[in-house]
Amino acid sequence: MNHGPRAAARNRAALVTAAREIYAQYGLDAPLSAIARRAGVGQGVLYRHFPDRAAVATAVLEENVRQVEKAAATEDLTFAGVLGVLTWHLTESAAFIGLLHADGAGRSGIRAYALALSERVERALRGHLPDGHRLGAADDLMLAVAMVSGAVTGPTREERERRALAAWRLLVVEVGPVRPFEG
Amino acid sequence: MNHGPRAAARNRAALVTAAREIYAQYGLDAPLSAIARRAGVGQGVLYRHFPDRAAVATAVLEENVRQVEKAAATEDLTFAGVLGVLTWHLTESAAFIGLLHADGAGRSGIRAYALALSERVERALRGHLPDGHRLGAADDLMLAVAMVSGAVTGPTREERERRALAAWRLLVVEVGPVRPFEG
């Protein structure tokens, strides 16, 4: 048996991947035991890497947020393009929806983390917001994101993408291709 | 002690009122014990009236839906007027938000009830939808309701109303006064 740092890093990565999949299916309230089982490790190993539920959720959401930030950092991506990447993460992750739809995240006791992550998403988007855009005033940008998050339901990613795009269309906001960011 | 039908009806009414208040504060995942405590009855009495969590939630949501239906049945209320009553119930009840924001309701195991109630809300609204309204096409009506539901967060009813009205404004949909229906 190898309990060295390499095995630890592998276990951590497996746990984050498992958590992302479980959250996508069941939301942030999924039991931690299901995450450990999916990752093929014992619950003791899970607790060694993540002291509590909030730590697991944050590790997963951190990935979503970082992808949106990377997309936003790309000079030649338009606001619509960044929204496309954001929308991909909304359709892919029930947990990410919960984050941007503030009260859902609050229930799982990760409100402070959620707020900080949500503010990073807002900064990433706002940096690309063109002058005179219809979401330019006050809270409208993140209000629109919460509205689209509220609409993104459905059993398959395709159905969730269809609803997300219909929601942006109702908001009269142009969205680029819905896709992960491949820097 | 009086265990007759009158006391039973009183207990049931007290439980529904308590559940409405508890759900408004904590959402549909609030423990049943909190509802019994707020109503001032034992958990045994709660279970006599409501065999499970779904039965309690349905009794509360039934009230919200019936109010919207009553408003819609009023000949002289416009679509905007009915939306105003719907919006009042959204700002007053976290449970009602969960209902119209389909996945939230699903998690509490009341999906079938939720679907039937949500369809009643849709019928009530659709009956008043003017020809050529921008929410007239296909799924747009309930998509818009889900979007506004997603935006209605915040610690006070006033804040939730402010956000709901901002959401309808972003959708370019006129809403009448936000108020309960007083038939």
Image: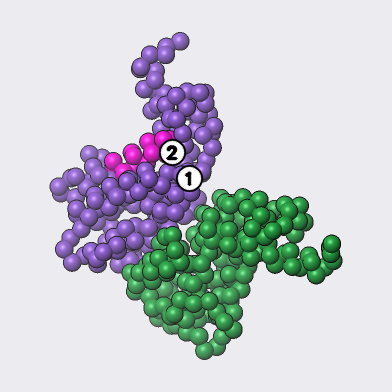
Chain colours: A purple, B green
Residue A70, image x, y percentages:
23, 42
Q: CA distance from mark 1 to mark 2?
A: 8 Å
Could one spot residue A157 in this view of the protein?
A: no
Left or right: residue B97 compared with residue B147 = right
Question: Given the image, what chain letter belongs to the residue carrying mark 1?
Answer: A
Kind of element beneath mark 1: loop
Of the pair B132 and B168, the residue shown nearer to us:
B168
Q: Which residues are magenta?
A: A54-67
Residue A106, image x, y percentages:
44, 49
* Badge 2 amino acid: Ala
Residue A130, image x, y percentages:
18, 60
Residue projecting furthest to the bottom: B76
Across the whole image, how many numbered discs are drawn on residues? 2
Could one spot residue A100 in this view of the protein?
A: yes
| Residue at horizontal 34 percent and vertical 42 percent from the top | A64
Left or right: residue B149 compared with residue A144 = right
Secondary structure that dominates the magenta span: helix
Of the pair B73 and A76, the residue shown nearer to us:
B73
**C-beta proximity under 8 Å, tags 1 and 2:** yes
Label 1 environment density (alpha carbons within 10 Å; few <14, some 14–19, many ≥20): some
Residue B27, image x, y percentages:
54, 56
Question: Given the image, what chain letter belongs to the residue carrying mark 2?
Answer: A
Location of the N terminus of chain A (image quadrant): top left
* Badge 1 amino acid: Ser
- Quadrant of residue A162 within the rendered picture: bottom left
The answer to whether marks 1 and 2 sit on the same chain is yes
Residue under label 2, please give it.
A54
Q: Which mark is residue A108?
A: 1
Of the pair A81 and A6, the residue shown nearer to us:
A6
| Residue at horizontal 69 percent and vertical 58 percent from the top | B40
| Residue at horizontal 44 percent and vertical 24 percent from the top | A48
